[in-house]
Image (tube, rainbow, N blue to C red):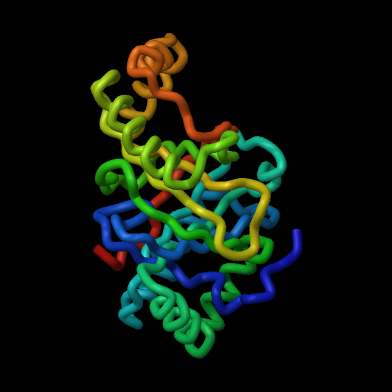
Amino acid sequence: MKKIILILCALTISAQSVADHHAPTNSAVSVIYECTLNEGVSPADVVAFGKSTVNKFATNNDLKMNSYLWEAIAINPPYDEADVRWVNYFPTWVDYYASNEVFGTKGQKVVGEFYGMVTCDKPVILGVRNVGGPIPTIQEKPLITSVCQLNDGKTMQDAMEFVPKMTKLMNKTTGANVASSIFVPAFGISGFDYVGMLTGATSDMATLMDSVRSGAMPTAMAKAGMQSAATCVNDLHQSHLMIQQQQ
């Protein structure tokens, strides 16, 4: 894969205004870098680098940012080439550009160390909104991303209404506590209408996935008369918290 041209953004870690993982109630800017690991480097090495070197740099420069590494577990084409995804969240575009400037003027060494570990494509930028409850603060958690195409006659408003209702039904049916977000393409990516995300503690996510395996969740959905607004392909990552600067 090609190296990112916009190197100043490579380690600009995003902010958000919720307790943890992915998106505040208001929409935020999400920047995702799809990367392959360089020889001899593991996902754990990249996580450790993010938690130490990059976290310290962000703290010392008072940057509003959060960052996570999504370790690819089971990913469908055409998004299956990346070993890891470095995911950044910014509450505003002002924060995005402010962080770029700091990394561009003070962070060349940090950026160089990053590119000694991974090789990345250019970033893709999406708008993201937390639509299905607060996401717990957990260092590591399973994460399901659903790459979705709206069904005929359906709109993004239909999806924004369906996903939180579905999340509520999942938690009611299983007794789990999972949360959801929606990512909508902004710059640098096309081919789908949105990405839905489900995440939570490992025990809760395992309970949810077992409810699908056993048929309990599809049965509950049918009884509730719920039909998805989109046709989706599901992928599995392991999400690792690296930086949490913005509450």
Q: Residue at x 30, y 25 (%)?
A: 169
Q: Is residue 69 left or right of residue 129?
A: right
**Residue 7 at x, y = what percent?**
61, 76
In the rendered view, tell whether residue 10 sits above or below residue 160: below
In the rendered view, tell whether residue 10 sits above or below residue 184: below
In the rendered view, tell whether residue 176 sits above or below residue 197: above
Q: Which residue is drawn at 44% across and 41% down?
A: 159
Closer to the camera in the image, 143 or 187: 187
Closer to the camera in the image, 30 or 111: 30
Closer to the camera in the image, 93 or 63: 93
**Residue 207 at x, y = what percent?**
34, 21
**Residue 58 at x, y = what percent?**
37, 75
> The N terminus is located in which quarter?
bottom right
**Residue 153 at x, y = what percent?**
55, 37
> The C terminus is located in which quarter?
bottom left
Quarter of the figure with residue 235: top right
In the rendered view, tell whether residue 216 sits above or below residue 10: above
